Image (cartoon, rainbow, N blue to C red):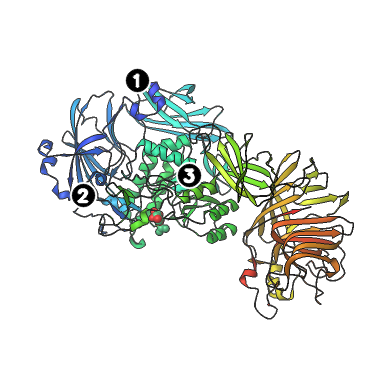
């Protein structure tokens, strides 16, 4: 067989002028001839029906139909689509396929004038197998539906008139590896072209960085030793030229502009071989690397807010135009999605150009899925398939390696695991070691750089992450199944990603519903509606957008959750945080609306200063005095049209219940002394220890109220019913927690200061702890705590309590509160206490159990005033309700635990608790009911102090 498949190489183009090369649009190149358009066509139900006239090259004897290329035959009226998720729609008898193999014969005459020394015939994708003849001579055949095939046709092509004939069949050996969850379709569904070339066979440009400098390694594969020169352009300007002396050159880029999804800065490198031969390659300076077990882009950990995307158009199938691709990717960017897994095959080449331009992080997935095989006989374990696995991997990597947007190569989808994947991974690594490898089926991470799972529950992921069961970073290559009305629960997933650095995000399944449009009924068809005998019904409709790209509520939900801005709000004060890692937010205006049941009651726009990456805005005050129950909606509107957004569009938004600041705010001041941040207001002064993150001083009327730091703690004095669980708690050293502050940032202006504190609170010896994020709003009116925390490592499953202790210099004399009372109340013992305004002397606060133990808790407290013996007061307010208590902080001799003030007390403390375990009966009976147990699950609270 005369098979002239050209060498594997990257996909690039020659141009005749510098101008067109810089435009980087192959369709404008004089050395590019498209063969897209109308072709003569003959459709056959069975491959054996191919007329001998075709095989003999007597094309004029055939009575041809017409078809347009690129297209799927099934969309042009030839044959029918079949939808299966993972069943093969034909008998599994590899490598054989049915004789009833729908086949299309394509034929075209072209007039051609050669311009350079070599002609290459390029197919970007044909489903699923094809052979080509030029001027009646067989040029070759190929398969691998979504991979590029190039034939060297220099000796086949004549000057002037030429005949090209192509046979395309739907089923092939390759179909066994193309069992993706999608429509089975066929035809020349991507571009076909003839390229004029000289004898350069490959161009590979690899960015890398060393000692803070950026370089591009230029590798050129060429028979003759004249490599020409290379010119580097950025933003339309030429930076410099360099003569290329060999097939490998290192080029340093001074003052580099790096590529990220947020800042998709692209350089254009032009290789000039003569004044009529230019090759452009676009380069993004970026590095993907594992640092401290995390996947990092330019040294910053990545969070994938991604989607799985099939190529699909309701009237064209997988044949997308450049406009379709661009519009879709702009829509994806607009919804804040930063990553795409090309589920489950390499995409149309133009897709990567746009990802490079717009900034999207790509997992490029190989065209391999053998989902319908049982594990024992999966091709992945069968050496007869080895070459096919390896060559599919190499074809993808060769074609795409110049694209900066590709950070990860994926070996395929749902094909079990075996030797063939190991060999494929090895060959890919040899060819390109600058990307990471992904394959979900490699459950033990034998060859992959990340642990990838599908649809894993939050509980299971949390278990692994908190106990650090795996070292490699975890991603969800599929989650959030968007079939019909859904997915739900995305917020909790996002919170999980934020809680654990080792979980680096995920990819929603999937972007678009693949319904096929039927004009006569104005409906979208799904599996089974083409009379397929084997099909999976509406599983093909599981996207975030309808087939025509109408966003579903699921997409709006996802967008809201992943928007790259965090809003912090407290009583008319707003702070924004830019969650981008590389890009300054500088094109936004804040539009605020306050609504009550009567409608809009306040509306105003506020300009904002640019917010650098990972930084906070200033404090914005929006403080109309509104008494009614109302909500504030804060919208960030785009100020100036850019590539993604139009002026006035909502970039991000958030709503909060609105409470206004009732008191006038006086000026505050602050200073840092000895790693302590001291804040002075007209009513009080407070100090925070920047090493522990805790409040370490609270001064009112010149008196220091705090004896030591206010701290988060978990223990309570043992009650009789805790005697069993207490043994476990003792092993965890619950009574001895140390606080370490991971970060301490603050934003301040004349009237307020807001602290952003990240703490790790852990006991000695054992390896577990609590991650705590606290936002503390301080103004002359009060100190508001917004707390979020979660457990890390091998933490105790059940806890006595979670809350704050304030060790005081003064004794609490009297307590007033609104909440359950007058007696003590615990979650499983509170029926005799009623909500109300209560007041008690401290002597009456606890119950004198004969054996000292936890007592005195008051639950559902939204307001409390602790009056101290020096006349000062500490007031706590919380809309959600907290537990409060007054405690003795002196440790009893021989007992490690703090005991309460049910007897004579020396030092006083206050407790403000987020959660308190119930009592149960376990001294001689059952534990508290599950609902009354405090588990090591994430917790949060909002309360204010003064
Ligand atoms: C998973 C497939 O990878 C994906 O292609 C799609 O079929 C999805 O399911 C369901 O819509 S595989 C599944 C066994 C988790």
Q: Residues within 10 Å of mark 1 (few under 14, many from 20)?
A: few
Residue at image point 15% right, 50% down: 48
* Secondary structure state at the residue bearing disc 2: loop
Disc 3 to disc 1: CB gap under 8 Å: no
Question: Can residue 222 be seen from the camera position used here?
Answer: no
Residue placed under numbered mark 3 in the picture = 339
Spot occupied by residue 511 in the image (x, y as percentages of width and height): 42, 48
Spot occupied by residue 858 in the image (x, y as percentages of width and height): 75, 66
Residue placed under numbered mark 2 in the picture = 102
Instruction: Tell me, for residue 276, which label it has, or none.
Output: 1
| Ligand 1 in which quarter | bottom left
Disc 1 to disc 2: CB gap under 8 Å: no
- Answer with left or right where residue 936 lies relative to residue 188: right
Q: CA distance from mark 3 to mark 1?
A: 38 Å
* Secondary structure state at the residue bearing disc 3: strand
Dot placed on the residue nearer the N-terminal end, 3 or 2: 2
Dot placed on the residue nearer the N-terminal end, 3 or 1: 1
Spot occupied by residue 70 in the image (x, y as percentages of width and height): 28, 39
Dot placed on the residue nearer the N-terminal end, 1 or 2: 2
């Amino acid at each position: 067989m005369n098979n002239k498949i050209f060498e594997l190489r990257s996909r690039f183009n020659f141009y005749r002028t510098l101008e067109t090369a810089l435009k980087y649009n192959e369709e404008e190149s004089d050395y590019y001839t498209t063969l897209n358009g109308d072709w003569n066509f003959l459709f056959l139900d069975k491959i054996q029906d191919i007329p001998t006239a075709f095989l003999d090259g007597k094309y004029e004897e055939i009575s041809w139909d017409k078809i347009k290329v690129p297209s799927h035959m099934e969309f042009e009226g030839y044959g029918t689509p079949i939808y299966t998720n993972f069943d093969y729609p034909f008998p599994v008898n590899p490598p054989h396929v049915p004789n009833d193999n729908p086949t299309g014969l394509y034929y075209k005459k072209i007039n051609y004038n050669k311009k350079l020394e070599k002609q290459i015939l390029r197919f970007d994708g044909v489903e699923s197998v094809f052979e080509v003849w030029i001027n009646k001579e067989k040029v070759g055949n190929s398969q691998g539906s979504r991979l590029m095939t190039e034939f060297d046709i220099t000796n086949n092509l004549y000057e002037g008139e030429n005949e090209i004939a192509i046979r395309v069949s739907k089923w092939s050996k390759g179909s066994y590896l193309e069992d993706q969850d999608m429509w089975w379709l066929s035809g020349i569904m991507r571009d076909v072209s003839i390229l004029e070339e000289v004898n350069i066979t490959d161009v590979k440009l690899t960015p890398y960085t060393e000692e803070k400098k950026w370089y591009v390694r230029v590798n050129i594969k060429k028979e003759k030793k004249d490599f020409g020169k290379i010119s580097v352009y950025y933003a339309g300007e030429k930076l410099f030229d360099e003569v290329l002396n060999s097939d490998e050159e290192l080029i340093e880029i001074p003052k580099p502009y790096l590529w990220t999804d947020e800042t998709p800065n692209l350089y254009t490198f032009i290789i000039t071989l003569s004044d009529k031969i230019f090759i452009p390659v676009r380069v993004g300076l970026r590095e993907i690397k594992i640092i401290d077990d995390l996947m990092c882009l330019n040294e910053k950990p990545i969070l994938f807010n991604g989607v799985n995307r099939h190529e699909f158009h309701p009237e064209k199938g997988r044949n997308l135009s450049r406009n379709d691709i661009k519009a879709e990717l702009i829509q994806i960017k607009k919804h804040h999605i930063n990553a795409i897994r090309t589920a489950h095959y390499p995409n149309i080449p133009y897709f990567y150009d746009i990802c490079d331009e717009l900034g999207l992080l790509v997992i490029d997935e190989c065209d391999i899925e053998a989902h319908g095989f049982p594990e024992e006989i999966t091709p992945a374990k069968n050496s007869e398939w080895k070459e096919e696995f390896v060559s599919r991997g190499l074809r993808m990597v060769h074609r795409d390696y110049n694209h900066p947007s590709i950070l990860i190569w994926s070996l395929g989808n749902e094909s079990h695991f075996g030797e063939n994947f190991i060999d494929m991974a090895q060959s890919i690594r040899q060819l390109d070691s600058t990307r990471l490898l992904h394959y979900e089926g490699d459950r033990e991470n034998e060859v992959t750089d990340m642990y990838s799972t599908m649809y894993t529950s939050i509980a299971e992921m949390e278990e692994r992450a908190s106990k650090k069961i795996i070292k490699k970073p975890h991603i969800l290559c599929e989650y959030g199944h968007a079939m019909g009305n859904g997915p739900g629960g995305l917020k909790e997933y996002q919170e999980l990603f934020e809680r654990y650095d080792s979980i680096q995000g995920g990819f929603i399944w999937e972007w678009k519903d693949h319904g096929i449009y039927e004009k006569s009924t104005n409906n979208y068809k799904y599996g089974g509606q083409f009379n397929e005998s084997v099909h999976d019904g509406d599983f093909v409709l599981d996207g975030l957008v309808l087939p025509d790209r109408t966003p579903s509520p699921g997409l709006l939900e996802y967008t809201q959750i992943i928007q790259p801005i965090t809003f912090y709000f407290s009583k008319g004060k707003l702070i924004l945080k830019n969650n981008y890692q590389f890009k300054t937010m500088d094109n936004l205006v804040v539009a605020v609306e306050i609504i009550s049941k009567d409608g809009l009651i306040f509306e105003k726009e506020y300009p904002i200063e640019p917010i650098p990456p990972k930084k906070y805005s200033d404090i914005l005050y929006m403080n109309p005095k509104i008494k009614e129950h109302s909500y504030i909606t804060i919208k960030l509107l785009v100020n100036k049209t850019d590539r993604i957004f139009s002026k006035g569009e909502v970039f991000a938004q958030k709503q909060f219940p609105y409470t206004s600041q009732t008191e006038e705010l006086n000026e505050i001041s602050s200073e840092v002394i000895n790693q302590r941040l001291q804040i002075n207001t007209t009513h009080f002064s407070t100090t925070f220890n920047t090493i522990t993150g805790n409040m370490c001083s609270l001064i009112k009327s010149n008196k220091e109220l705090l004896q030591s730091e206010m701290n988060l703690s978990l223990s309570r004095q043992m009650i009789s019913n805790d005697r069993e669980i207490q043994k476990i708690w003792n092993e965890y050293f619950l009574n001895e927690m140390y606080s370490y502050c991971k970060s301490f940032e603050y934003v301040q202006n004349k009237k307020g200061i807001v602290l952003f504190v990240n703490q790790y609170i852990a006991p000695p010896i054992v390896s577990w702890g609590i991650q705590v994020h606290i936002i503390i709003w301080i103004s002359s009116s009060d100190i508001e705590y917004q707390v979020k925390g979660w457990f890390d490592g091998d933490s105790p499953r059940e806890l006595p309590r979670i809350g704050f202790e304030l060790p005081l210099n003064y004794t609490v004399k009297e307590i007033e509160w609104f909440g359950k009372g007058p007696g003590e109340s615990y979650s499983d013992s509170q029926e005799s206490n009623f909500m109300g305004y209560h007041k008690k002397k401290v002597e009456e606060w606890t119950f004198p159990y004969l054996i000292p133990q936890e007592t005195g808790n008051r639950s559902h407290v939204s307001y409390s005033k602790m009056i101290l013996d020096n006349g000062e007061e500490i007031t706590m307010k919380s809309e959600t309700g907290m537990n409060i208590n007054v405690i003795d902080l002196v440790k009893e001799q021989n007992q490690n635990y703090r005991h309460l003030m049910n007897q004579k007390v020396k030092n006083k403390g206050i407790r403000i608790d987020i959660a308190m375990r119930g009592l149960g009966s376990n001294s001689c009976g059952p534990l508290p009911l599950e609902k009354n147990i405090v588990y090591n699950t994430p917790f949060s609270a909002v309360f204010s102090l003064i």
